[in-house]
Image: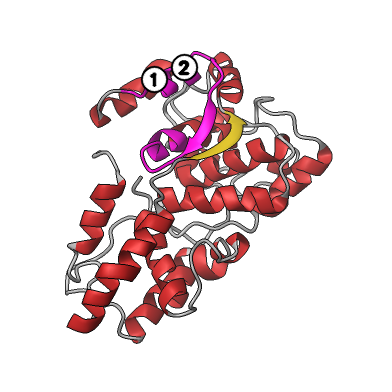
Amino acid sequence: MEKVTRRRVLSWVTALGGAYGLGLATPKLKAYFEGIALRRAVNSVLPSKPLPTGLDLAKPVAKLVEAGVIDPGKILEAHKDRGPIPEWVSLVLEGKQQELILSIENAPFNLNLLWPIGLATKTAFNDESPIIGDDLPNFASTGGWTLGRENNGAAYFNKVETLSLSPEQSSLARRIAENIFRPCCGNSAFFQDCNHGSAMLGLIEMAASNGRNSESIMKLAKVANGFWYPEKYIETALFFDAVKGDSWEKAPADLILSSKFSSAKGWRQNVHEVLLDQGLLMRPRQGGGGGSGCAV
């Protein structure tokens, strides 16, 4: 998989011309949006300055390595085609304290390190998870996790005391997870049926266990989702700018991450189709499409 960078995403978006629907409908609109709003959207969703979270990623990862949920060798092998492994990833896998930093360059690595945290961390609310049952091994989040000792991540679901969550923190994490959606499907982070769902849940749990409040956690989640689904959220930023007259930065995180704007159906109806209907995007060419939402 090719490395994702801000420059690559901006070049990709600007050059689409309609295959995915990001070509603007008229020359005037095209010139305006490509020159102003489009770049503003890209720079907002994919800021050049990384966002420190103040959360230590190494501590929970070390517990997962010890429990066999993470095999460091498999993690490194999975990322070798992206180029040299960043030093911070190696340090995290060695259990040496490293702050979780959100950026487009870090996004793929963060995804694969947060995924097993959400998957394996033992919490009271996971006893009621929608993925529990006979199909547990068949979800992308479980069957897709092959970077531990076992070949199927279902073996680790809700099994490891990775984080210390008080009853209040656990309740907060669940409530937030139930209200954060992702544009690859219609499920919340509580329904962690894919890698992005598990990774988001892991981020939420880490932040809650560190005493963050709902607003703080939602802001982190908004940034993380933007890095994991840049194409979708660049359109969302365009929508808020051109239709709502509001900037991405000022748009409330809980609104952006809600089912209305972040589930696959909600995003398409309330963002993509609105932009198309208002003539701000061109209809896709026959045979064109946006590809899978789970691309990072």
Residue in the foreground of this view, choosing between 56 and 30: 30
Q: Which segment is the magenta one?
A: 85-111
Name the secondary structure under disc 2.
helix
**Which residue occupies 55% across, 66% down?**
251
* Vertical placement of residue 72 versus 199, above or below: above
Residue in the foreground of this view, choosing between 90 and 173: 90
User: Disc number at residue 87?
Assistant: 1
Q: From the image, tell me which residue sits under label 2.
A: 91
**Which residue occupies 54% across, 58% down?**
181
State the separation of the CA atoms marked 2 and 1: 6 Å
**Marks 2 and 1: CB-CB under 8 Å?**
yes
Residue flagged by tag 2: what amino acid is it? Leu
Percent position of residue 114, x then y: 52, 35
Quadrant of image for the C terminus: top left
* Vertical placement of residue 264 versus 164, above or below: below
Quadrant of image for the N terminus: top left
User: Disc number at residue 277?
Assistant: none
Number of marks present in the image shown? 2
